[in-house]
Structures are given as C-alpha cells and as structure tokens.
Image (cartoon, rainbow, N blue to C red):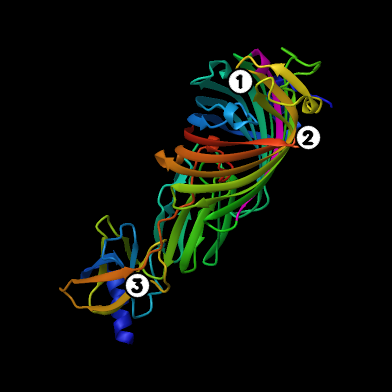
Amino acid sequence: MRTKAMALILGLLLGNAHAVTIRVNVLDSDGKPIGQAAVYATPDTPQPVARAKPKTLVIDQVDKEFVNHLTIVQTGTPVSFPNHDKIRHHVYSFSEAKNFELPLYEGTPAKPVVFDKAGVVTLGCNIHDWMSAYVLVVDSPFFALTDNQGAAQLEVPAGHGYAVSAWHPQVKKRPPGNAKVTVAAGNSTELALTLDLKKSFRPIRLPATANLDAGYR
Amino acid sequence: MIKTACPLSVIVLSGCLAVSSPASHAEWVEWLADGSVSGKFASNINGSFFSAQQLDDFLGKGLLSAGRAYQFGGYTRGYFTADWSGETYGRFEKLGQYTVGGKAVLTHKFGLGRQAPMLHLELADAEIFSASQLRSGNQLSAGLRLSSWCNEFLQGFVAYRFDDRNAPPRNLRMGATASAFDIQGHALEIGSNFAVTGQVQLTTSYGHRWGDIVSNNLPDSLPPALLGKVDSIADDDAFPGWTYRTQGETNLYRLGLSYALWDGHAATALNYSYIDTDALALGVGYASHQIQLSVHYSY
C-alpha cells in the first residue's frame, strides 16, 4: 500500500511520464451521449500531500449569465468571478460544500473564492434569478468535461486503481454513476458510465414585458 | 367620488430627482429598453350585456419602454421608464389609440437567493389619445405584488392594483354629468408561474376586480327602471348605441404559456383570458373570451 502511494506521488510530482488514458463515455438511461458532464478519477491510494499551488480559475459573467454552466475543480482551488457586464452582480451559494456571498460588485472581486471542500456548489445571482451555474469540487487532479459526443479523456499515472465517476447538474440519483478500474502501463482503458437525468431545467429568463415575473428583470 | 390625476411627468421626474439626491444612496445600474407586439382577439369587445349585441374584433398592440434602473442598497431597486403604447383595431377603427406615459417601480427582495420573497410596487400614469373622443383622457394605476419561488419550478404571487381613468365629459345622455370613462377600480390577483422547462413557462391566475365598469348597448336595451341605477351614459362614437358606466365586479381567469427566445432576451407568449363581469346594481352581466399572441423583447 505504502509503495503504491509513493509510486503515485512520484508519478504526480514527475508529471505523467507513465500516464495512461482512461476514455470515458457518459450516456443517459436511453444510451444517448451526455455532453458537458463532469468526469473524474479518484485514486485508490490517498492524495499526495505535496502538490503545486492550484491556479486560480475563472467563472465569468457575460450578458447576465455565468459563462460556464458547469466547472470542475480540485479541492483547494481558488476561483475568481469577474463580472464583464456593465451592471452589477451579486453572486452567492448556499451549498454545504461552499457557502459564500459576493455582494453587489462590478469588475473582478479582489479575492478569489477558495473551494476547499469536495461536493457540488450551486451558484446564483441575487439580482438576476435566472443566472445559475455549478462547481463540482473533487478530491482529485484527474478530471474533465465530456464533449458533445459524451466523451472525455483522463490522463492518469499507470499502475494504480481508480474510481471513475461522472456527474451532471440534471442527475437524478446520488451517488453518481461510477466504476472502478485499474490501469497498467501502456494500456489505455475505455469505459461507459450511465447517468439517470431529470428533465432539462434552468431557471427561466423572460423579458420584463412578458409580465411573467421571474426576478428583478 | 374623488377623481385624481397624476401628470406622467411627475412620476418620472420625482423618481429621477429622488435617486439623484446625494442622500439617497441610489446608484444607476443599467439602462432599460423593452418592447412587445401582440395580436389579440376579443369576443365581446364592447362589453355588451346582450349576446345579440356583442361585437368581436381583432386588435394589434405595440409597446415601447425605455428608462433607467437604480440600486438602493443590496436588495432594493428602482425602475423609472417612459412608455409608449399603441393599439389598432380591425373592425372598430375608432378604438385605435396610443398612450404616452411614465412608470416608477420599486422592488425589494427579502433576503438572499432565488426563493426569497420579492415585493414589487408600481405607479404608472399615461395620457390616452384615442380616435374615440369619448375614450381619450388619463389613466393612473398603482399596485403592489408579492411573489416568491416555492421551489425551482413554481412561483406564486398575489397582487393588488388600483386603477383610475379620467376622461372629459362628452356626448352625455340622460342627464349624466361625468364621463362614462371616469372609471375607478380595485383588483386582487392570485396566480402562479410554473417553469415547464428552462424555456417554457405556464402561468395561471385568478383576478377579482370591483369598481366602475362600462358596457356598450343599444339605447332601448335597458328598461327605464334600470337607467336610474347607471352612473353615466354617453353616445358612443366607436360602437353603435350608448356606453353605460355602473358599479360592477369582474372575475378574470388567465392561462398563459411563454417560450423564451434568444437566451431569454425575447419571448413569445400565448394567453387566454375568460372575463366574467356582473353589473351588480343592474342585475345583468356579460362574459368575454380573449386570446392574445405576443412577442416580447428586453435589452
């Protein structure tokens, strides 16, 4: 066990010199591909303590919307919420994994928000109720979003076991779809994960004159 | 009965003065520009008590609104707009009109998050320029609305509105002294918006209004005993016959479906309304069906 952990740490620290690819296809219960789903691989062995300081990620706001509906980050990652609209936003989250509030602001807040606990964080804007986005915080550096064909690739150090999971904001069941794989050097692996999704939903945005009040504007 | 009229300029100017005061802590946050066009069918456009005299028509309507939004602290906003609307009718051209007015809206959200209740206060005033001289005048409305999302799909709301329309006395009959279109009323509404998907919203509401109502009927339709219970009678210049003003109550049932377009900047909406009006003093009433298809845009 200790040897495996050391090998994993070395693999991580030296870069993925012996990296192999896990190809993941995420499908819904009808077998159709799910785009923009989060896929991540958690090593069986504990995470290395020593790691590079995570870079600050950006979740932008343009035209009264969050630019990315789903962002996946590793635990401890700082995220900045620049506002590129010419109006002010009021970003918040009530989620257990990260409860925070950025009261009305323009431009870029002075300090990023550090996502220090694994879990799902639901973002909103208190001025524009239709604005919504998600941050999936995972205890792993191996993650990706699926493309429109529902496919994603994870580059992981070889010779270890991983729990590969998928998540999407519309997922019905928890825990999300997952599978265990062990990857050997030189052998890439392909697997399919299935998610049971509820109907497509994002808070509705309608013009003010439609007289169907859905928020401030 | 006290009739009030509030010049449209008062609303917009007082709003702008209030928010430009150094002590107001108001901050301009965005420009507002809204517009809509709609087509509508009304089955009893003259509001006649008698089915044989009920007239239907199609009308087209346009609305333009522009102004500014101000922020008063973290949870309160003010909207001040200048508004123009126009209506044109298929058969009864003299109902054609345009209005020019202003509107002040104050919204307050009680807390953080989408499900926090929101209070919406509104004061609007407009001058009505109608091809029917009888119908030209001024319209003031004031109201409040409390809404809250119960969950991510369902929003409930309750609203109250006072409306006060004034018109110069013209074409009066039977000793009437005030215009048939001097109309005041109070209305309560309860309803819900249901997000069927992220683009489609279903709206249902029930409204109850009490106050003045108008009804157009042929001159010999009402028995003389009832004419004494009418508050005003005038020769109508848009429909055949006379228009009567009296006290009444209206129940309005509305069902609407909206479809968001262009990332929510626009929407198309289909609304059906059933309107059931009782002239309490006269013991008669009328019903009307209205269907409206509209397209809306917000900057």
Going by the numbered disc 3, the residue's amino acid type is Gly
Q: How far apart, in angstroms, are the residues tagged by discs 2 and 1?
A: 32 Å
Label disc, if present, on residue A67 of the rendered structure: none
Q: Residue at x 46, y 45 (%)?
A: A65
Nearest the eye: B64 or B133: B133
Instruction: Give me the residue at 52% from left, 56% from top.
Output: B153
The residue labelled by disc 3 is A177
Q: Give a yes or no on whether discs 1 and 3 share a subunit.
A: no
Do discs 2 and 1 belong to a common subunit?
A: yes
Tag 2: residue type? Answer: Ala
Q: Which mark is residue B99?
A: 1
Instruction: Report whether residue B17 is seen.
Output: no
Name the chain letter of the residue that bears numbered label 1: B
Nearer to us of marks 2 and 1 is: 2
Of circles 2 and 3, the one toward us is 2
Query: Quadrant location of the C terminus of chain A?
Result: top right
Percent x, y for residue A13? 31, 70
Q: Residue B214 lies in what quarter of the image?
A: top right
Q: CA distance from mark 2 to mark 3?
A: 68 Å
Residue A1 screen position, x and y as percent? 32, 87
Q: Secondary structure at mark 1?
A: strand
Note whether residue B30 is visible.
Answer: yes
Q: Which residue is mark 2?
A: B281
Q: Is residue B148 above or below residue A6?
A: above
- x, y (%) of residue B257? 48, 44
Magenta range: B133-149
Dominant SS type (magenta): strand
Query: For numbered disc 2, what is the local secondary structure?
Result: loop
Residue B79 in magenta stretch: no
